[in-house]
Structures are given as structure tokens and as C-alpha cells.
Amino acid sequence: MKIELEINSLAEIKSEVLIVPIFQEDNLSHPLLAELNQLSNGVLALLLESGELKTKKTEISYLYIGKQANISRLILVGAGESAKVTSQLLGQLAATVIRFMVSKKLASAVMLVRNPSNLVSNLLARHITEAVLLAPYEQNKYQKKEEEDFQISSLALAFEQTIEKPLFDEAVLRGTIVAEAANFARDLILEPANKLTPKEFARRAGEMANSLGLEFNAIDEEELKKLGMGALLAVSQGSDEPAQLIVLRYRASKSTDNSPIALVGKGITFDSGGICIKPREGMWEMKTDMSGGAAVVGTMAAIAKLKPNVDVLGVVAASENLPSGKAYKPGDVITAYSGKTIEVIDTDAEGRIVLADALHYANQQKPSCIIDLATLTGACIIALGNCRAGMMGSDDKLMNELRQASEQAGEKLWQLPLTKEYQDMIKSDIADIKNLGGRYAGAITAAAFLRAFVGDTPWAHLDIAGTAWQEEDQPEMAKGPTGYGVRTLVEFILSRSQKN
């Protein structure tokens, strides 16, 4: 989809479709609505008088004007109260309309970007670009199709406030890069486990890295054994598919600081629960247990194109967790890469075990901070539902930065406590640490386990179990993988880059 700048006035616009956000307080005294009423031959006035004009957020009123007019169709999308408008909301409205246009097979449109709060125009352009490129994504790769998926060719944006073309183009480019990176992550998450094995995950990450100029290394099991990564190997030993530690590195050309931002992702390409096998119902969803790893790989793809002035390291621990005669067992004691011993209480708490080695590996690279992402616990879904990720960590400054980045990116998260009481819950009688803290505070004790492997490095953990996959269609996004985390991480990294 081509995103363009529309500089013509409303009277001069020629388009198949005109998209207009409509606020709750709108009436015909507003010059824009009066002009739209004329375009619609008075239909808008009738809708207003009857109270049938839809103004609730994302609700759509669709008007056909006629082929003879410069604009043949109006899509009026409810925007709620004008005082509460944000750039993320306008992006959500644009995405909603794009999905509607796909259903109607409308190929092009102009959107009036109404901006009553005087928001920064290039920020609006960026968020709208991201939203409309994420919106049409569908999980139908393996369906037999009678015809090709319908593609929208262009969307032009007409701003209330003036925006210079170079600033607009820069905003659209960044929005495009971030959306494409998130969609790349979604492609990885969507793949069934028989297609995306740990080795194939590494191959695709390497293919991306080679095409974009990132450093890449896939550490195989032979090397993992030499390094002593007993935690990752323990989880992997129940599967015939070998584990991989995927390492991606971006080196900033102007950076004088060799301490990278380290991103670490859980990459369990299928999680049966191992010996502590999961119930049949819903087990198919465990192909998505590598969503944290996919977010890291997607973020690295965006960083390679955006070229921030800060080094970035991406590490993904990729494995399957399956039951077999070789599988690790409850009660086993394993030795992690850091030298710490882990008592295995539950083989279905495997994500934190593979992350133990990945986090220690990242910490050895002397990073400025470590951020890990993982579909780690059902407990986080119980606590926060499907609309927010849980955030825990060792450094308040880092978590505040991440919170601000998530708000700017439009990905919601919520901080949970991580104090000494929770660390005490994972003390083992026979090893340095155990991998399960009991029934209560499951998301927090999982984070407490991870904290033991990051040393004194500022660290934050994002539990994305509830946000990585969307169970139902939403107006702005189809059900399926979300690519959660890519937009927040890119925002965080670019913000850090600007401070260098």
C-alpha cells in the first residue's frame, strides 16, 4: 500500500473513497461537516437529525454518493470525543477503515486527518502508516484460494495542519519499516511447528540478517555443549530437533559505546509441556511459544533499516519441549551456563530455563541493559488479560523508559512488583534455585527466576503471554499473531539513540 500526502483542499480532492473521522459533538455548524453534507446531497444532515450517525470509536457509516462526483463514497468513522484524540486512536480508526475497505474491495482512498488537539502531524503520519499496514494481515497462508487476496493500492492523508513533505516522507518511512518488521514477526509466529523448527527459525533469522547487513550466528548443540549451556540443552533433549541459540548484532557506525542494548527472546517453537504434558485442549496454540523470539528478530530487522546510533544485540533461545525417553524430568537438577544449578519442579516451566542460558550469554556481552520478552506464564493472562503485557525488572529507570516507549508505540503494558519475598519463593532445598514457585504469583516468581541470571545489569522482563496472539477479530486487526513488542522495542531503542 502506498501512503501519500494529499495537498488539495476538500473541494479539489478526487478519490474513490473519502475517509472522515466523526466526533460525538460534530454538527453542521462545523465548516467541514457542512461541506460534507453538500457532498452527500444532504444525507449527512438526515443522519445527524435522526441520531443515526455513528460516532462511537471505530463504528462506520458508509455512504455512496455516485460516480459523477469527485468523491464517489464516504466512509465516516466514529472517533468519540474530540478532546480525547490521540495519534494512536487516529491510527486505530484508519486501520478499522482499511479492513472495511478490503471487505468492500475498495482500492484507494483519501483520509482527512482531523486534529482538534493539535498533535504533531508527523507523529500522526507515522502511527497511521503503522496501523494501516498492520491492519490487512490475515492468517490464511496455508488456505487454498480461489483468487488472490485483495490489496489496497494507496491511501492519501490530508492534514488539517500543514506538514512539510520531507517530514511526512520520513514519518511514513519509519512507520513502514516498523510495520513490516512487526508483520515479519507475525509471519514467524503464525508458522506451525512442523514448518518452523528451531533450525528453520535460525535459518530465517540468518536470511534476514544477511539481507540487511546484520551480524549473525546460530550456535548449534555441539557448540552449546562446549559452552556448557546445560539449561537450554536440558529442555531440548526430549526432541529430535536440535536447539539453536540465535545471535544477531547491529553495530552503529557512529557509536563510541560498545555496550549494546540486549534483547533476549524465548523461542520455544513448540511446547507440549514435556513430561508434565499439557491438556489436549488449546495445545495447538503452543506453536506461538516463540513469540518473544519472533519479536526480537523482527525488532532487529527494523533496527538494521533505521540505523540508530546505538549498538543492539538480539539473542533467541530456540528449542522444542517434548516428552520422550530422553526428556528432562521433574526432580532433575541441571547446571545452567552461568554455573547455577536448577531444580526442575515442572517441565512445563521450560521457557524460564532456556532463557537462563540466553540471559547469561547476553550478560557476558557487557550490555547497557537487558530486555527479555517471553510468552512465559498463564498467570500473567489471569492477572492482566489479553490487552496488557506484564513488566517486571531490576531497574526503575529502564522500566520507566519502556513504559513511555510502549505508550508512544500504542502497545500496553503494566508493571508488577518484584521484591525479595518472591525470590524466596523459588529457593530450592537441593539446588541453587528451582524453576517453579508454587501456585501463587506465578508471573512474578517466573520473573524472579530470570533475575538470578542477569547479574547487576539493568534488566526488564516483558511477559507477553496474553498479548502475542489475538483470539478474535478486532476492528483494527484480525485474530492471530500480533507481533507485540516490536513497536515498543523500536521506540525504546530510537529514544536511547537520540540521547547518545
Image (tube, rainbow, N blue to C red):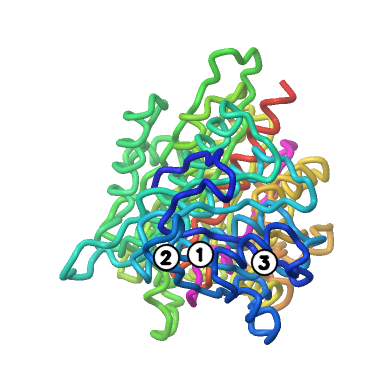
User: Disc 2 designates what residue?
Assistant: 101
Residue 432 image-quadrant placement: bottom right
User: Disc 3 designates what residue?
Assistant: 22
**SS at badge 2:** helix
Q: Which is nearer the eye, 477 or 266?
A: 477
The answer to whether marks 1 and 3 mark residues whose Cβ atoms lie closer than 8 Å is: no
- Residue 161 among magenta residues: no
Alpha carbons under labels 2 and 1: distance apart: 6 Å
**SS at badge 1:** helix
What quarter of the picture does the C terminus occupy? top right
Alpha carbons under labels 2 and 3: distance apart: 18 Å
Q: Which is nearer the eye, 493 or 430?
A: 493
Q: Which is nearer the eye, 417 or 360?
A: 417
- Residue 461 among magenta residues: yes
Q: Earlier in the sequence, mark 2 or mark 3?
A: 3
**Residue 327, can we see it?**
no
Q: Which mark is residue 97?
A: 1
User: Which residue shows up at 78% across the image and 46% down it?
Assistant: 118
The answer to whether marks 2 and 3 mark residues whose Cβ atoms lie closer than 8 Å is: no
Residue 493 image-quadrant placement: top right
Q: Is residue 363 left or right of residue 176?
A: right
Alpha carbons under labels 1 and 3: distance apart: 13 Å
User: Which residue shows up at 63% across the image and 44% down it?
Assistant: 159
Please give the range of residues in magenta.
455-473
The answer to whether marks 2 and 1 mark residues whose Cβ atoms lie closer than 8 Å is: yes
Within-10-Å neighbours for mark 2: few <14, some 14–19, many 20+:
many
Main SS type for the magenta part?
A: loop
**Residue 269, can we see it?**
yes
Q: Amino acid at mark 2?
A: Met
